[in-house]
Amino acid sequence: MSDQLTTASAARGTVSLVAGITTELVRETQARHALAPTASAAVGRLITGAALLGASLTGRERLTLQISGDGPIGALTADAWNAGQGVVAARAHARHPHADVPLNARGKFDVARVVGAGQLQVTKSYEIGQPYSGIVPLESGEIGDDIAAYLANSQQIPSIVAVGVLANPSGIIAAGGLIAQLMPGADDGTIGALEAAVAKMPPVTTQIAAGADTRALLTAVAGALELNIFGDLGVAFDCQCTREKVETALLGLGRDELLKIAGEAPDTEATCEFCKRRYVLSSNDVGALVARLD
């Protein structure tokens, strides 16, 4: 089943919903970074959360989720942006992609342990104006709970966030998630119906592995509430790194450091931390950067 996001509302617009299947997105991220099993679950949940939140982005808006924890995986970052033509693009990386821990007592990936205690920072960049950032302490390290805590505390939007990755020794089986947000006007009946639906809903990845599409996920979370589907968006792994951006970063090192680099080796290599693309600059290329500074 192709990756997809579907947006909707329920209860006469008092509940905002988005559901997503991100299996291929998580598979590509895992492959590019050779993520260990628990790291795959952590990074997969974060990039899924970024994609879900990215469904509301327009124009050149951009969303970045950054987790700084004291667990063995270190920092995690995921970006999402509107790539145009009805597609949300996303990318992610972890400081220590090979971090792994034993399964928890329920036989599940122990994402909370590999992430540890720390904070979640969410930054939204706009076409015009300064970026907005909100920071909240990690609620559990399970990532879904932490995104929900951010929405409730920083955005003042009570939310249910479910993100998951299902895997076995052969790779990623299913990945996806959903977000349900209470909008102004939601009454006690709506809240109760939503809570009841969520309480009996199987895990998102269990539903996806059994063949559920995004509309089925939305139907499950809406329960008895009247559902209004808005539309679908594609999801794709992408990266906006370029050779020009690498050169700009090198220019920031200054003239003396560039001269040192040019004299130490015939080639200088830079690797994008998100997509692992390699950029190779010869000593002459680095010398040309020095000339630009001069």
Image (cartoon, rainbow, N blue to C red):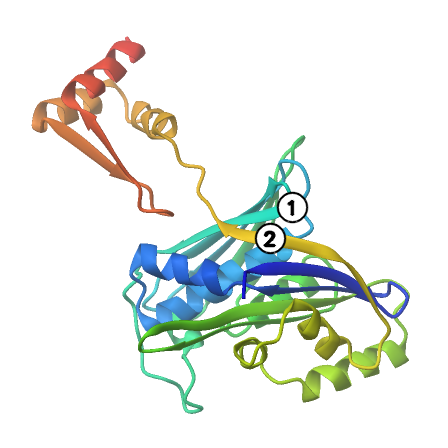
Q: Which residue is drawn at 52% across and 63% down?
A: 22
Determine the residue positioned at 44% across, 62% down.
Answer: 26
User: Residue at horizontal 24%, vertical 18%?
Assistant: 255
Q: Would you call the spot at circle 1 few (<14 residues within 10 Å), some (14-19), or many (20 or more)?
A: some
Mark 2: which amino acid?
Gly
Dot 1 falls on a residue whose secondary structure is: loop
Left or right: where 57 falls relative to 239: right
**Percent position of residue 206, x then y:** 54, 81
Provide residue 122's location: percent of width, then percent of height: 57, 52
- Measured in 3D between alpha carbons, the distance from the residue under mark 1 to the one under mark 2, in whole angstroms, is 6 Å
Q: Earlier in the sequence, mark 1 or mark 2?
A: 1
Please name the residue that numbered disc 1 is placed on: 86
- Marks 1 and 2 close (CB-CB < 8 Å): yes
> On the image, numbered disc 2 is attached to which residue?
234
Tell me which corner region of the image, top left, top right, bottom left or bottom right, holds residue 153: bottom right
- Judging depth in this view, the residue of 98 and 30 nearest the camera is 30
Label 2, residues with CA under 10 Å away: few <14, some 14-19, many ≥20: many
Residue 152 lies left or right of residue 244; in this view the side is right
Disc 1 marks which amino acid? Gly
Q: Is residue 95 above or below residue 21?
A: above
Mark yes or no: residue 14 visible.
yes
